[in-house]
Each structure stands twice: as C-alpha cells, then as structure tokens.
Image (spheres, helix red, strand yellow):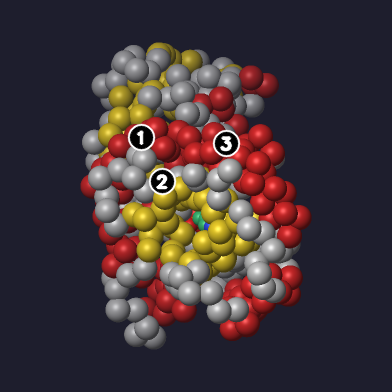
Amino acid sequence: MKTHIEISRDNLVHNLNLFKRLSNKKLMFVVKADAYGHGLKEVLSITKDLSIIDYYAVDSATEALQVKQVDDKKKILVLGWSDKEELEALLINGFETIAPSSQFLKDADKLAGKLKVKADIHLKIETGTGRMGMAPAPAAELFNVSPFPYPNIRVKGIYSHFANIEDTTDHSYAQRQLEIFNSLLAKINVPGLLRHFSCSASSLLFPETYFDIVRVGISGYGYWPSKQTYISYIEQDKNGKHLHKIELKPVLSWYAKAAQVKTLETGDPIGYGLSYRTFNKTKILVVPVGYYDGYDRKLSNISTIIVNGVKAPVRGRVCMDMFMAEVTHIKHIKAGDRITLIGREGDEVIDADDLAELAGTINYEILARINPLIPRIVR
Ligand SMILES: *Cc1c(COP(=O)(O)O)cnc(C)c1O
C-alpha cells in the first residue's frame, strides 16, 4: 500500500464513551460522509459491538443501506432529503427519516400507505438555520388536530440544529434557537416523543441542549468542532462549570510511502507551474498522494509532513496523485520508507486542524474529503 489510513479502535471507543458519560442520554453517532472520511465499514466494525450507541445518523438511503449491512441492530436516522425513490427504499427497510415540511409529510404518508408500511419520522424544525425544516407554528398545529392527519406516519422525534455554535464564542444566537425550540415543545404533549438538538459543540458546552438524544459527529472522531468551542470550554472550566474533564483523542492517522528521494540543483523548479525554486542543492521526496486522495491543493507550498520524526515542508504544487516535500535536513530516507501526513510520529504531530488552518477550511472538510478508495486499517 503506497498510502493508507489507520483507525484507532481505542480512541474511537474512548470518545464515544465520553459523550455517553457526559450526557447520559441516548447517543446518536453521526456516520455520514463515509464516517467523516474515516471509512464507514471500518468504523462500524468497531461500533457494532458498542451498546452505548442507540442510533446511527446518515445522510441518504444509500448510506443507510451500507450501515445496515454491517450493523442491523441499531436504529438508523436519515438526516438528509430523499426523493421519492429514495424514500421508498427507506420505508421498505424500516429506516427512520426526517420531514422538513407539511408537504413532505403528506407525500410520505401517501407513499407509506401505498407500500402498506408505517413511516417513522422525526420532524425537522426551523429555528434559525435557514436550511431544511418546518416553522414551529405548523409543527405545533400538527399535534393539536385530532385525529392526526397522516395515518401512515408515526412521529418518533422532533429536532432542530444549531446555526452558529462552532463559529463563535458568543452563544446568544444558539440560545435564541433553543428558546424557540423550547417554546414549541411547551405547546405539544406527546408521550415518548424523542426530542433532540445537540451536536458535538453543544454536547461539549451546554447540558441544557441534551433533551433525549445527543447527535455526535466530529468529536466522536476525536476533534473539537472548532477553536472557538475549545476556548468556550476552557472559559467555562475556569469558571468551575465543568464536572467532566474532556480529552478528545483523534481516531485517524494517514500514512504514505516515499515514492522517490532525489537531489535537485540550486534554482531548480519543483512541480506544475514551477511555483517553487530551490535556493540550494536540495533533497526532495515524492509523496504518492495528491488532491484526488483528499490532500487539498491549497496545501501547495505551505503544509508539512513528518519524515523520520522530523517535519518536512511541502514544496511546489500538490498534483492530482503526487506532491513533493523537502528533506534536505533529514538523513536516512529512501524510497519505500513510511511518512506521516496526519498523525503523530516521535515528538511531532500533524492533525486535521493544522491542515484545515493552512487550507482555509475546517477539520470536518479535511477529514470528510479523504478518498474512500484509500485502504483503512483498524488498530
Ligand atoms: C452532521 C450533523 C450533526 C453532527 O455535527 P457535529 O458537529 O459533527 O457533531 C448533527 N446534527 C445534524 C442535523 C447534522 O447534520
């Protein structure tokens, strides 16, 4: 394998246990986007034996079917929108999904009737994200008409999602969203209805967002959702608010083998567009990984890798399937030797936060875009 991903079983279990302990609610583990780029199959091979997980959340019928193949014991909620064909697949397989509007409920009810099944639905409430979701008023009305207008629908849950919780240390907007949700809940009385709102950031910071289920994505994989979330946690900690010491452990490491090591002369260019020229006689290493693999082209000339426990700067543009790094300062490196793109080696660490900062994006995107074709190994 010229490049591969390693998944740490211990770290994944550690993070998920932490959220169970923190919340003591039902745990919904979000495994959309190929388990945030970690590899859906490999992640499920670990979590299928974890009884602390009640639900998986995915984006689509396709993903739901993949999950079911590995773990058919836990519930699956499809968070994304489904067209009629996909909805049919969901209903036939007994997956739960969301309804973002009254029209969707109406259509799902009709389809479920035709298929002679019940549709298990979580109502998605618009509280300020400006994305999918129905306004609180019609949602409240639904529960206050009798009989319930959609005989083939079972409303299992009601939920919403925060719009501005990772991007700031000012959580007043999140607070307002929560108030809208709470005032809706006060108007309806359905025993057993599962209420949920919390993602990783709110689960780390605000117990009042837990309700019945916490939906954990990024931090299950060992990352803080953002610097702001971490700062907010530290601030709260200083004020004595936290009972739990939170240590998140990254689950994913990314390795490759050196494809070639060679020496260039002073002034030689490196890579497409000749965007880097050597200042001296320079030893370079060719990494057999490129932007197709998910190593962002924006990392050209600015990121580093770890070679023999030492950081080595990327030189030139990241190509589709390769990039180059300078290893003039590193001895004993030859083709076939292992190098680290994300992970820890010796005293050095490179994580998805580092690459995200350099590429002008978030750790979510760095992880989710790692090509699913790269082999994953569970350790
Ligand atoms: C993706 C997603 C989550 C998970 O968010 P994290 O920040 O990764 O924990 C939770 N809820 C919904 C609706 C989502 O789409």
Residue 95 in sight: yes
Q: Residue furthest bottom?
A: 239
Where residue 117 appears, as percent x and y from the top left, is 55, 45
Please report the residue visible at 39 percent of the width from the left and 43 percent of the height from the top.
350
Q: Which residue is mark 3?
A: 89
The quarter of the picture where the C terminus appears is top left
Q: SS class of the residue under badge 1?
A: helix
Task: Tell me the CA gap for discs 1 and 3.
Answer: 17 Å
Q: Which residue is mark 1?
A: 70
Q: Nearer the viewer, mark 1 or mark 2?
A: 1
Pointer 2 residue Cβ closer than 8 Å to ligand 1: no
Q: Which residue is mark 2?
A: 351
Disc 3 residue crowd, few under 14, some 14–19, many 20+, Cα 10 Å: some
Q: Which of the pair 75/278 is nearer the observer?
A: 75
Give whichever of discs 2 and 3 has the lower sequence position.
Answer: 3
Give whichever of discs 1 and 2 has the lower sequence position.
Answer: 1
Please report the residue visible at 58 percent of the width from the left and 43 percent of the height from the top.
116
Q: Residue furthest right?
A: 103
Task: Tell me the CA gap for discs 2 and 3.
Answer: 38 Å
Disc 1 residue crowd, few under 14, some 14–19, many 20+, Cα 10 Å: some
Q: SS class of the residue under badge 3?
A: helix
Query: In the rendered view, would you say 336 is above or below 315?
Result: above
Q: Which of the pair 53/261 is nearer the observer?
A: 53
Q: SS class of the residue under badge 2?
A: loop
The quarter of the picture where the N terminus appears is top left
Q: Nearer the viewer, mark 2 or mark 3?
A: 3
User: What is the three-letter code of the residue carrying label 2?
Assistant: Asp
Q: Which of the pair 272/202 is nearer the observer?
A: 202
Give whichever of discs 1 and 3 has the lower sequence position.
Answer: 1
Please report the residue visible at 26 percent of the width from the left and 21 percent of the height from the top.
332
